[in-house]
Image (spheres, rainbow, N blue to C red):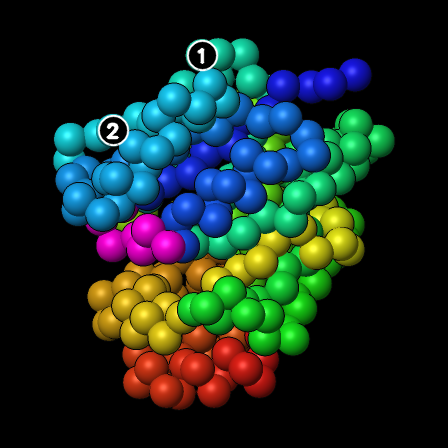
Amino acid sequence: MNYPVAVIIPVYKNDTPQYVRPAIDSIIKQTYSCRIYIGVDGPIGNSLNSCLEAYENNKNVSIVRFAENRGLACVLNDLLQICFDNGYEYIARMDADDISLPDRIEKQICFLNEHPEIDVVGGAINEIDEEGCESGKTIVYPATPTECKKFFAKRNPLAHPAVLFRKSFFDKIGHCYRPEYRKNQDTMLWYDGLMHGVNIANLPNVVLKFRMTEALFKKRRNGWVFAKKQLADRLQINKNLHYGHTADLFAYAMFCLLIAPAWVKKIAYKIFR
C-alpha cells in the first residue's frame, strides 16, 4: 500500500540558494512519492526567493510564506498543522541545506510498516562539506527504542533533519514543538516524546547527507544564554528520565563546550561525534 507522505522543509533568510536547490530536489526525486511543504520564515532575499519561485508550478510542492521571522519551532508547528489538516499520517523532516538519499523515504516507510510500534524513525547520516563533497564521516545512531532512550542521556538519539514521524508521535505528547524554544527544539521534542511513551528507532542505513560548514560551529547553539538554558534543561531531563549523575556530568561538559571558542568546538566534534 502506498501511504501518503508529507515532507516539511523550513527556509529562512540566511539559507543559501545553492544548498536549498539540491535539498528540495532530493525530495522531489525520491523513489517514494511525497508532498513537499516549504515554510518560509519571514522575509528573504531576492536570490533565495527566485530559487523558491522555480518550484511554484510543481504540483507536489507548496510554498507557505510567513510575514515575520518567528523561529524554527513556530514554522515547523504551522507546517505540521497543515499536514494534519490534510490527513497525513506520515510526516518527514528535512533541512534546507542537506540532501536526502533517493530511497530515504521508501526505506523509512517500509520500516514503519514493519514496526507498527515505532512512532518516529531516523537513520545514519554522511557528512558533506560546503561543496557537497563527503568527508568520509558516517554517524550511525542507536537502533532500538531501548538503545535510543539510553543514548539520550548523553545526546540526541536522532538526526533531526533525517526523521520521519507518524502522526501518533504528536498525538501521544499532545502538542508539537515547544514554540518558546528558538534553539534546541529537537532535544525538547525527544524529551517530551520519551516522557509520554513514544518509541524511537533508527535505520542502520545512511538516509541523509548532512552539510557541515564553518558557520555551523560559530552561530548555532552557543553563547552564555543558550548554554545556561541547555544546562538547566538537561539537568531537568536527567532527573525526570532517571539518568543519574553520569548524565549530569555530560551535561556540565556540554555546557563548557558551548561557551568555548569555535575552534575548540570543531576539534571536540571531530573527536567525540
Determine whether 222 is above or below 91 in the image.
Answer: below
Quadrant position of residue 28:
top right
Which residue is label 1 attached to? 85
Say if residue 179 shows up in the picture: no
The amino acid beneath tag 2 is Arg
Whichever of labels 2 and 1 marks the residue nearer the N terminus, that label is 2
Q: Is 183 situated left or right of 234 in this image? A: left
Residues tagged 2 and 1 counted as in contact (Cβ below 8 A): no
The amino acid beneath tag 1 is Asp
Image coords of residue 107 (percent x, y): 75, 39
Please tell me which residue lies in front, 37 or 151: 37
Please report the residue visible at 58 percent of the width from the left and 58 percent of the height from the top: 209
Image coords of residue 229 (percent x, y): 31, 61
User: In the structure shown, which secondary structural element does the residue marked by tag 1 occupy?
Assistant: helix
**Which mark is drawn over residue 164?**
none
Q: Which residues are magenta?
A: 12-18
The CA distance from mark 2 to mark 1 is 17 Å
